Amino acid sequence: MTTLLLHHEAACIAHATPAGHPERPDRIRAVATALGAERFAALRRELAPEATLEEVALAHPLAWVEAIAKANPASGLVQVDSDTIMSPGTLEAILRGAGAAVAATDAVMTGAAANAFCAMRPPGHHAERTRAMGFCFFNNAAIAARHAQTRHGAERVAIMDFDVHHGNGTQDIFWSDPTVLYASTHQMPLYPGTGAVSERGDHDTIVNAPLRPGQGGVEFREAMTAKILPRIEAFGPDLVVISAGFDAHKSDPLGSLRFEADDFAWATRELMAIAARHAGGRVVSVLEGGYDLRGLAESCAAHVAALMEG
């Protein structure tokens, strides 16, 4: 089996943001260029399909999903919040982002792929049940987890988020759900202001390991080894979902952590090892943040290369 890459560069580029906005089409161009290198020739590549509104509603109320779809403009830009923007191409991009998560889950849960990476924008982990924010509209990691449960009978899903920003949306969606463990390393203090160690969920299935500004790979690996990996191991997931944000890279303008590309590769291998012991190796990864183009490309390449080792 191979690693599956789900992407749709044209749809991602068509999601427009204002000049100077960090979540810009060049992000996906950088990822596409990096994953076009010869060492990624063995990737199985498929275009991301559009999710149905009902599939998106696995993680969000259907009425809210429909309202987002109706808000998509025919022209110009619509500001959903201070930094979350819709353009005429946004709806297709976010539906294909969710569709990539669904298709990736289908592939790994049926054994058609060893693991999968969804190279799509915009990101999703700030999207709460009924709130679009932080560049995010639909929560792709949450949709993947719910699809694995409802379509494929997964009893427990673990979501690991190593974006520099805390995934408040994913935490919100699964706060009261004992069947999904959400774990996050992130910079604190930083947007969106959530992610304290004390935030543990109704069933102790939220695991936050915040890092201080200026900390890097050493502290990240210590937090993962001491606080997060043992919890995921004990949870015994049937699927591991990765919210793969690369804005903890030392070059990223939106954070102050000091990760190197190899830190993301290390974390990927550790999560794959847990998946191999408990989940038949099943890993679905979805792209989140990463706003320095070179850092994003290098980190994404390191992450996908590690996935291909599985």
Image (spheres, rainbow, N blue to C red):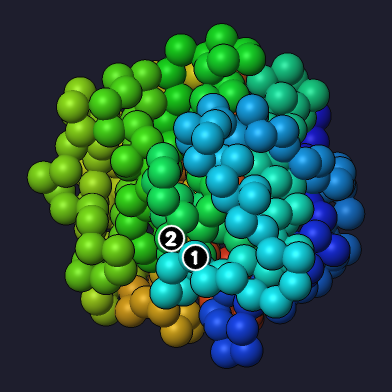
> Looking at the picture, which amino acid does disc 2 mark?
Met
> Looking at the picture, which amino acid does disc 1 mark?
Val
Element under label 2? Answer: loop
Residue at left offset 45%, top offset 84%: 253
Crowding around mark 1 (Cα neighbors within 10 Å: few <14, some 14 to 19, many 20+) is some
- Front one among 150 and 221: 150
- Front one among 276 and 26: 26
* Residue 131 spot, x, y in % from top left: 41, 50
**Could you tell me if residue 290 is visible in this image?**
no
Residue placed under numbered mark 1 in the picture: 80
* Residue 103 spot, x, y in % from top left: 74, 33
Residue at left offset 41%, top offset 40%: 129
On screen, residue 179 above or below 12: above
Left or right of 150, for residue 14: right
Query: Image quadrant for the C terminus?
Result: top right
Earlier-in-chain disc, 2 versus 1:
1
Residue placed under numbered mark 2 in the picture: 133
Contact between marks 2 and 1 (CB within 8 A): the answer is yes
Of badges 2 and 1, the one in the foreground is 1
Q: Quadrant of residue 58?
A: top right
Left or right of 145, for residue 30: right
Crowding around mark 2 (Cα neighbors within 10 Å: few <14, some 14 to 19, many 20+) is many
**Could you tell me if residue 166 is visible in this image?**
yes
On screen, residue 291 above or below 71: below
Mark 2–mark 1 Cα distance, whole angstroms, equals 8 Å
- Front one among 178 and 112: 178
Task: Tell which residue pokes out farthest to the left in this image.
Answer: 198
Residue at left offset 61%, top offset 56%: 71
* Residue 187 spot, x, y in % from top left: 28, 66
